[in-house]
Image (spheres, helix red, strand yellow):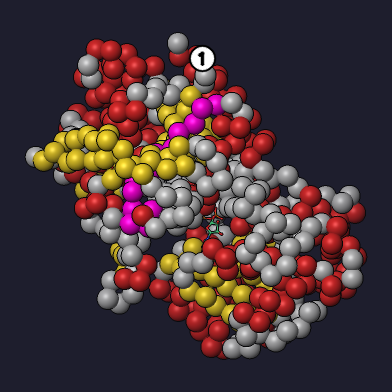
Amino acid sequence: MTFKCLHAASEVAGFAKTGGLADVAASLPVALQARGIETVVVMPLYAACRTSKQGLTPTDHRFRVPMGERMIEGRLWRSTLPNSAVPVYLIEQPALFERDDPGAKRGLYQYADDAGRLADYADNSARFGFFARAILETLRLLDYWPDILHLHDWQTGLTPVYLREIYQHYAKHHLRDRYQRIRTFFTIHNLAYQGVFWHYDVPMLGLPWRLFTLDKLEFYRSLNFLKAGLVYADRLTTVSPTYAREIQTTLLGCGLHGVLMQRSRDLVGIVNGIDDQTWNPETDAMIAATYNVNALAGPEEEGGKSRCKTALQKHFGLDRLPRTPLFGVVSRLAAQKGFDLIEKVVPGVLRQGAQLAVLGDGDKIYRDLLLKLKGDFPRQVGVHLGYSEPLAHQIEAGADIFLMPSQYEPCGLNQLYSLRYGTVPIVHATGGLADTVVDATAENVALARATGFAFMPFTPAAFGDAIERCLRLYHDEPARWRTLQQIGMLQDWSWRRSATEYERLYRQAASEFV
Ligand code: ADP
Ligand code: GLC
């Protein structure tokens, strides 16, 4: 019998995206399918999905689930993942999901108030409680019974609870059996986002009060969706081995390190892969000129990467200087991403003449910080506040150096895209950044294994020192710089390796429980 899995996530690239979760949800299923595991994806149907290139088709599958006193209806729509035949089912419930509108500053989970500050939608618990349950309804409606139900982040945290506490007991007899055979995987993409709501949402979500205890859903007198997933799922994974260790400490455990320590035997860290079709400098249609690792060996000014740099400088109205180091940043503007360090250190670097191109969206304090930087260095800094996929590719291709001084980073994808595009990353050695970037110490450079610059501790001094080391190599040792770029480009961070690891865990979990 074919081994089957179903992935459920609140965002999937090609349909709706705020960060790396969407990239993973769109590419891991394709890699699993390629390994012969039948894979289906489920996500909410947001307004953004209606206009996606993928095209949606309605199905006749409708369902109703209780929410408080009311029954809420949903309907399944169907599509496929970008560049693949993997089916995607989208849960239609317009009042809950179709309110996003970038023009009006309304996102998938948050909206901007009149002062421009981001706030969570007040009914997020109902929205994602409904989604969590709809995932289980989908199995019944499609008559699709996966061996593994793979859930991502807090938005799906209640699914294993509904499965174990309701569907495995109360469904009709033949279905009960089916629900009982499913094993759940829960992946933590970012422990800082937990979905914490006031406790009166417990009955609204159709859950009994007896579950509202310290060892289950309760978290400092509130209801915590992520904790629910951590307690109820059969297996836990996170997106890098270092982050798997870090989240079991008080420093990065976000109040849940105790729960994670208790489950440490079931917790594994697997570094994400990247979609190497979408992020490929040799075929990328969004960049000014394509290039590959060999092209970097030729005369610099003629190479594709140099042309991408010139195009990026032109885009942002910066001086077109081929030998001036151009730093790139593509990031959600959130506290996690280290903009405090950028604020303290980067002005000094700009004073020495470097250039900076930033693409980002998010918190107002960081938007203001970036606009100030641009105001202070108008000819050296380009800032685009908003979301733009083409520009993300153009920065990855056109920059010389990519800055990712995240305070913590579960995995991080942008440093992997940077490596692929020959853009040398400077990262704080935390989480997936520590696991994927090899610091250019003299020894690592000599052994031809360095791929970037990794600094520790998380201080302006250490960050400044890494930038200095990087610029020294860039200016003084062009041949070694080229080698650093080339070694980065030759790394294989595609899903091949990680999908194998997921498959191994899936099969182990499925066999252990029968
Ligand atoms: P996180 O998921 O924490 O945001 P990752 O590095 O894992 O961090 O993934 C970020 C993803 O979101 C990358 O694909 C990146 O290119 C993309 N991204 C972030 N901000 C923007 C933006 N403003 N415009 C376009 N893409 C963005
Ligand atoms: C989260 C993390 C990021 C990770 C991504 C995909 O958004 O912040 O580090 O790469 O999920 O797993």
Within 8 Å: ligand 2 and the Cβ of disc 1?
no
- Hey, what amino acid is under mark 1? Met
**Which residue shows up at 67% across the image and 59% down it?**
284
Q: Where does the image place residue 441, in percent across and percent down from the top left?
A: 81, 57
In this image, 425 relative to 221: left or right? right
**Which residue shows up at 45% across the image and 11% down it?**
514
Taking 123 as reference, is 404 above or below it? below
In this image, 498 relative to 211: left or right? right
- Name the foreground residue: 307 vs 111: 307
Quarter of the image where one finds residue 460:
bottom right
- Name the foreground residue: 494 vs 217: 494
Q: Where does the image place residue 171, in percent across and percent down from the top left?
A: 23, 20
Q: Where does the image place residue 202, in percent across and percent down from the top left?
A: 19, 39
Q: How many numbered markers are drawn?
A: 1
In this image, 447 relative to 5: left or right? right
**Which residue shows up at 84% across the image and 75% down it?**
301
- Name the foreground residue: 344 vs 310: 310
Residue 500 at least partly seen: yes
Q: Which residues are magenta?
A: 37-49
The reply to whether the magenta stretch includes residue 256 is no
Tag 1 residue: 1
Residue 401 at least partly seen: no
In this image, 476 relative to 451: left or right? right
The reply to whether the magenta stretch includes residue 45 is yes
